[in-house]
């Protein structure tokens, strides 16, 4: 469909300085109306509009670009998986269980439940002499991959928990139990020692303490956390280049484990998402070695943008490492609004060129077709994400 995009609104000013702590204060905070990010057009008519907040942060925690409220509290959900794996790595899990990069990637990801994912999770557990019956993530609505789901239905096969998108992250806790001789019963509970260890690693990655994290329950049963949007972006900036963490920062000891997680995700994008219709995987395959992408649920998206090296030894990077986080207000529009706004954001921060944008076109302007194959809808991003220093009061 070739309808012109709606006029871009003026960029919304940043609504306040970035908070200095990853902790969200329990006191009520004023909820500001986020700007419109994406407009759903049907034959040129604006049928719906999706609001949200976006922030780009460098490794030092400085807000580079923002639209809406960079301090907005969000639920980390599965965007926290890369940081949950840190607990297993620091505990010696790679050597103890002979973990390969693809296996680290699936534990850091949210896989589609395809056969390659099942084999990978099963291989991890089998090598640790554990049974997949321990997985307590359930299987409702799984697998995410529609072709795999259709094949299972055709063959009368019921999907098990191993096909759940979070089975890799559940495996982190189960392996921690094996490593430390802990009971696996209730491994998903916040008070279980495995989850306490994972929470401690997540807290360190976000520059806070477990006691200051607000813990809620994710849909798969694992704990997840409430954090300001800009802190999500900063954690991903550190994931992009862990070597930038100052030695005086308590997070500095995480740098080796963060590098392992980053590299595993970079080299195994299909284990992070899937082989079909997964924007995280598509972004990483389109920009190999430049980006780590990990979505949460309810419209949360997070991206680690790796630096571009300069011309010679000791030269400054052409582009510094940064992290991007965005949250769609009506989380139910996770696909069309989340896809369109994320690709547009990466265009505006300078990551995606024309060629890459064309490859990602179905995510940039997702649409629907009628029974005759005619395009009838299009989700169009209509925002300007300008550098903070260029915002006009």
Image: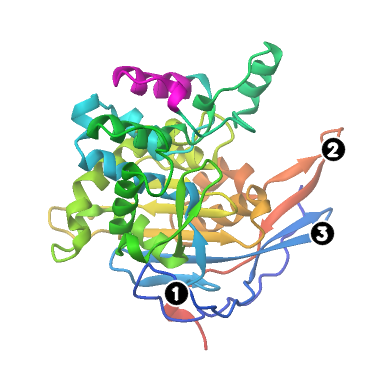
Image position, residue 108 (x, y; %): 39, 40
Which badge, 2 or 1, comes first in the chain's sequence? 1
- Asked if the stretch drawn in magenta spans residue 124, the answer is yes
Q: Is residue 245 visible?
A: no
Circle 1 sits on which residue? 25
**Of 257 and 314, the residue lying toward us:** 257
In the picture provided, is 195 more to the left or to the right than 285? Answer: left
* Residue at mark 2 to residue at mark 1: CA–CA distance: 48 Å
| Disc nearest the viewer among 2 and 1 | 1
In this figure, which residue is indicated by the disc labeled 3? Answer: 47
Could you say whether the residue bearing mark 1 is in a helix, strand or loop?
A: loop
- The residue range painted magenta reads 116-134
Residue 7 falls in which quadrant of the image?
bottom right
Seen from the viewer's position, the closer of residues 143 and 339 is: 143
Q: Residue furthest right?
A: 372
Q: CA–CA distance between discs 3 and 1?
A: 37 Å
Write the residue at 59% across / 35% down.
277
């Amino acid at each position: 469909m070739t309808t012109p995009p709606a006029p871009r609104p003026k960029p919304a000013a940043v609504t306040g300085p970035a908070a200095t702590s990853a902790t969200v204060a329990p006191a009520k905070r004023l909820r500001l109306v986020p700007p419109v990010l994406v407009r759903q057009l049907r034959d040129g008519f604006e049928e719906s509009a999706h609001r949200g907040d976006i922030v780009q942060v460098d490794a030092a925690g400085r807000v580079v670009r923002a639209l809406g409220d960079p301090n907005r509290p969000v639920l980390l959900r599965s965007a926290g998986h890369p940081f949950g794996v840190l607990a297993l790595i620091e505990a010696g899990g790679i050597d103890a269980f002979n973990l390969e990069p693809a296996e680290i990637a699936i534990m850091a990801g949210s896989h589609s439940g395809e056969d390659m994912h099942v084999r990978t999770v099963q291989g991890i557990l089998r090598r640790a002499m554990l049974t997949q019956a321990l997985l307590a993530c359930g299987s409702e609505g799984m697998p995410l991959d529609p072709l795999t789901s259709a094949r299972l239905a055709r063959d009368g096969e019921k999907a098990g928990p191993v096909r759940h998108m979070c089975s890799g992250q559940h495996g982190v806790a189960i392996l921690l139990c094996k490593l430390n001789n802990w009971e696996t019963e209730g491994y998903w509970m916040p008070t279980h020692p495995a989850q306490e260890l994972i929470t401690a690693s997540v807290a360190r990655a976000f520059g806070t303490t477990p006691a200051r994290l607000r813990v809620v329950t994710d849909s798969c049963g694992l704990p997840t956390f409430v954090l300001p949007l800009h802190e999500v972006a900063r954690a991903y900036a550190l994931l992009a280049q862990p070597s930038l963490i100052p030695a005086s920062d308590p997070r500095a000891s995480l740098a080796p484990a963060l590098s392992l997680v980053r590299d595993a995700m970079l080299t195994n994008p299909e284990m992070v998402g899937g082989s079909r219709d997964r924007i995280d995987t598509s972004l990483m395959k389109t920009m190999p070695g430049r980006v780590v992408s990990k979505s949460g649920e309810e419209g949360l998206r997070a991206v680690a943008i790796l630096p571009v090296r300069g011309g010679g030894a000791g030269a400054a990077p052409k582009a510094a490492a940064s992290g991007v986080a965005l949250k769609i207000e009506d989380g139910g529009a996770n696909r069309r609004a989340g896809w369109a706004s994320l690709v547009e954001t990466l265009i505006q921060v300078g990551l995606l060129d024309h060629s890459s944008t064309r490859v990602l076109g179905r995510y940039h302007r997702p649409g629907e077709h009628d029974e005759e194959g005619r395009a009838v809808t299009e989700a169009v991003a209509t925002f300007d994400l300008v550098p903070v220093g260029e915002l006009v009061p």
